[in-house]
Image: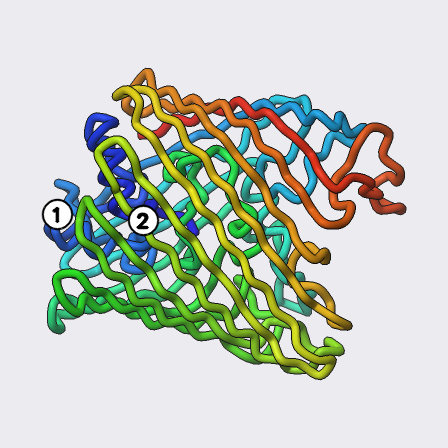
Amino acid sequence: MLGAFLVVAAAAMAEVDGGVTPLSEGSGSTVAEDARLQAANAAELVGGVTTAASAFTLSGAAEAFYQWNFNEPSNGITAQRGFDNRHNTFTVSNVMLDVQWDYERVVGRVALQVGHTPSSYYLAEPGRSGAAGVNGTGSELWKYLQQAFVGYRFPVGRGLLVQAGLFLSPIGPEGIAVRDNWSWSRSTLFFALPYYHTGARASLQLTERWALTLAAYNGWNSVVDNNGEKSVSVQASWAVANSLAVSLLYFGGVERPPGAPEGRAWRHLVDLHTTWVATPMVSLLLHLNGGVEPHALGLSGWVAGALSARFSIRPWLFAAVRADVLHERSGAAAPFFFGVDAVGSATGTIEVKPHARVSFRLEYRRDQATAPLYFRGAVEGDGLTRPWVPTRNAQDTATLGVTTWF
């Protein structure tokens, strides 16, 4: 999920922002090819196909925010929000340093990070013990590494790029870097779906507008696999530069650990998102996602959607709105995500860019669930020996954030 936003949205933002290029751009081919391959989050699927003057590119970014939760929870936690999850405190969200190269058909990327964000999204990384001469593995080992992969571009057709390593997830249009998104916070869908994968992928430019990527991964959020099965993915993207982009992706595999009561159940996910630059002033994004998992205890599944709009008011002033909802059914099985029937949110964001590489955002958001998921006032528990006890079905927050990049 890191990388440039859909290329048409990125192109629109670049036009009104004075030509700022996305963080995910690196070095390589032609502008037209870059636009097509970046369409529908393909910047991270075929990374390195861009137009930088040098074969080696160094970039970086820093993000920080202050948030007020109107529930005023005593534990200081804004629950179920992923990265912007601390009440009444200044937080360094993420600091990133990114090196990319594209030299004589060899491509690669190493992106390092530290902060609140990576510590949050690596929480699902499987922990495994070591042995004599063998290190253990878990979130503390990997959280400073955002991406690390190498690849080779074969002269097949319009271009075949084969890569292996650690990638941010191609599922969904939102990215890890705040500047690649329209709002400061990510949608409910982003927090529910996987953040990263380890494996190999091959991307082929089929025509001027079509690109196809096939991949095999360890699974959801696992640098080191937690079971003996692998997951597979296929994504087709179509784009008309500066106008419309569409992505359709299938992801499938066994994602539960060995010994789970659900058995070795195969999980099927389908993801669709499209961005339309309706006018130079207005861009729209629709994201739909759903999945099913037949297992020994029955059938589990979910369906989710998000609709966003971004408005260019002045060359330095923007506004964005978003609404999302996720319905989940787990039955007797362990829940996929939140463990309640439905979770949703409504978000409004004002963005001010006093400089081409600085963004200030003020955001108001309301989260709503069909059962208590959020904290308010004096919260029972200590978070260690006794888990915190959620008591509210809703929470409202105001967030002021700043991000800068080079």
SS assignment at label 1:
helix
Q: Is residue 140 above or below residue 298?
A: above
Horizontal arrangement in the rendering, residue 274 relative to residue 35 (left or right): right
Count the labels in the image: 2
Mark 1 Cα-neighbour bin, 10 Å: few <14, some 14–19, many ≥20? few
| Nearer the observer, 109 or 230 | 230
At x 25%, y 42%, the residue is 277
At x 62%, y 41%, the residue is 81
User: Going by the picture, which residue comes out furthest to the front?
Assistant: 278
Q: Which mark is residue 335?
A: none
Q: Earlier in the sequence, mark 1 or mark 2?
A: 1
Q: CA distance from mark 1 to mark 2?
A: 19 Å
Horizontal arrangement in the rendering, residue 334 relative to residue 24 (left or right): right
Horizontal and vertical percent position of residue 4: 33, 45
At x 19%, y 50%, the residue is 35
Q: Is residue 30 above or below residue 115?
A: below
Identify the residue under disc 1. Answer: 31
Identify the residue under disc 2. Answer: 275
Mark 2 Cα-neighbour bin, 10 Å: few <14, some 14–19, many ≥20? many
Horizontal and vertical percent position of residue 262: 71, 78
Question: What amino acid is labelled 1 in the image?
Answer: Val
Q: Is residue 363 visible?
A: yes
Horizontal and vertical percent position of residue 127: 66, 61
SS assignment at label 2:
strand
Q: Is residue 38 above or below residue 210?
A: above
Q: Is residue 108 visible?
A: no
Q: Quadrant of residue 354?
A: top left
Question: What amino acid is labelled 2 in the image?
Answer: Thr
Q: Quadrant of residue 389?
A: top right
At x 24%, y 51%, the residue is 244
Horizontal and vertical percent position of residue 392: 78, 39
Horizontal arrangement in the rendering, residue 99 relative to residue 394 (left or right): left
